[in-house]
Image (cartoon, rainbow, N blue to C red):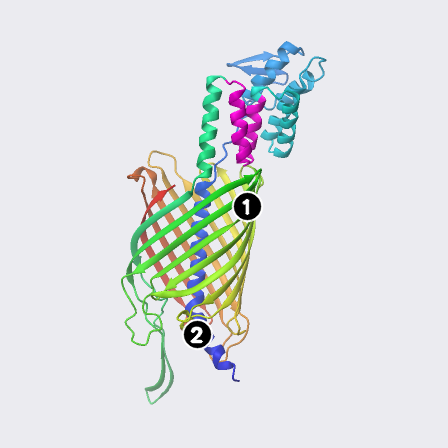
Amino acid sequence: MSRYPKAAWLMLLAGLVVPIAHADDDDTQFLLDQTRRAAEQKAQQEETLATPPGTLLYEGQVYQVPSQLESLEPAIYVAINSNQWTQLPDFIARYQQLPEHRPALVAMAESLLARFNGDYRTALRRMQDASMYEPNDARIRLEIARLWFEDHQDSKARAGFASALKAGMPPYAQGLIEQYNQALDRRAEWQGSAAVGFGYNDNINQGNGYYSCLSSFAGICFFERKMPDPIDSAMYNYELSLQKRFNLTGNHNVQVRPMSYGNYYSSTNPASNASIKDYSTNLAILQAGYQYINVRDNLSFTPYVEHYYRNRHSDYLAHGLLMEWRRTLTRKWQIGTSLDAKRYKYTTQGQLTGADYKQYQWSLTTSYMPQANTSIYGGLTLGRKKYEINQVSSKDWAVRGGVYHAFNGRAGAFVNAVGIYRETRNDAYDGFLGARRHDKQQVYILSAGAHAWQIAGVTPELRIRHSINHSNLDWAFAFKQTEVGVLFRHSF
């Protein structure tokens, strides 16, 4: 029995901490997804010209290509340069049967055909074969550098483009190489965004104002229960999210991702006995670790630290390890999974409203791009929070789905909307509260803006966030919260 008062105390603390912690996780994921989406280069689909077998479309005319060296060799180059990939296998097959064919041209053509089909392993291997056959061929040097670029082997790509220039390239090819070098420079820079804004939150303390009379006689209430009323407030907020990749060698990199965001509320809790007077918050995260990335896979192993500031003092310091893997299946489909383990350590002042615990999360995500300016995404997350006391420890699961769309037109309007449904169930029955806690939460986030309204590199963005939390202990933990704001964002 001596442990039970502590369990009751921790349960009340959990009521204050858990909903806010989920809000931080959701906002962090939203900001990370936004930064990743802005940084990723959107692949453009290559159009295949459907022409009759054994023929070649050139300058609007269809030509029959005979099985002769002087006809097939230029036909292969024209097919490659004009993206007529359906014609290429026939040309290669007939060309390599001729006794005086160039093995380097066959290898280069097979490499680029494999690239078009998404087989980059074969593409790189066959282009290296082509380079071995004719190491001084300028076109082969250019193509292998482009493959290294697309496979995110940045150091090799930069050296390859320099080698292609030394081999002698026509002016248009020199201009192309300059564009690739500029793209490599952009990859090596810090990427992300910074934003400041203002708005309004109708329930900064996640209160519900619930009142009930627990014991009464003759119309007189002797024991009553009154929960805090919602506190609304004007707010000022900011976001900063950056990422940078340092290429070590090949596909191996060091990845650094600092992030910080927070809210300042002009209103405070007027109650003299309130454990939290000021609900203004600041969250700062620094992730730094190993990343392996190629044209299909992005694998990272990232330790991180997290600092949370609330109620005018440091609330907790957490450290964790995040392992992520994303794979591009096709030009339209991508899947990913992650494992996250984190330990929260509350400060002396933070322990007045929170308690140390460990958190583990596993996520599965997928995204689909029906067109270049639209992304539909979703995922499943399983979570575990482990406190010292079973009554406070919990398991949760959440599903999320969203859509990002950039509208065509001069306005450059875009919208990003995501919905999250989460259920949380505590491990054990708590006699102090009279139930085993079970919460059901909905979160909706909408972000919209227009790049045409940009002034001095800053784009205005509307942000709406609405949360609904239901519980079998509604009197203690149910709340509704809406936040509306305008952010002014500068992207790097």
Q: Residue at x 32, y 76 (%)?
A: 273
Q: Is residue 386 above or below residue 295?
A: below
Q: Secondary structure at mark 1?
A: strand
Q: Secondary structure at mark 2?
A: helix
Q: Amino acid at mark 1?
A: Gln
Q: Using the image as rendered, state which of residue 268 and residue 372 is in the foreground.
A: 268
The reply to whether the magenta stretch includes residue 56 is: no
Q: Nearer the viewer, mark 1 or mark 2?
A: 1
Q: What is the span of residues highlighted in magenta in the rendered image? A: 140-169
Residue 5 in the image, given as x and y percentages of width and height: 48, 81
Residue 329 in the image, given as x and y percentages of width and height: 58, 40
**In terms of secondary structure, what is the magenta stretch mainly?**
helix
Q: Is residue 441 above or below residue 373?
A: below
- Name the side, left or right, on which 419 lies relative to 297: left
Q: Is residue 183 above or below residue 131?
A: below
Q: Using the image as rendered, state which of residue 207 and residue 221 is in the foreground.
A: 207
* Quadrant of res 353: bottom left
According to the image, label 2 marks what residue?
A: 12
The reply to whether the magenta stretch includes residue 154 is: yes
- The residues bearing labels 1 and 2 have C-alpha atoms spaced at a distance of 41 Å
- Name the side, left or right, on which 266 lies relative to 176: left
Q: Residue at x 61, y 23 (%)?
A: 86
Q: Using the image as rendered, state which of residue 291 and residue 388 is in the foreground.
A: 291
* Quadrant of res 118: top right
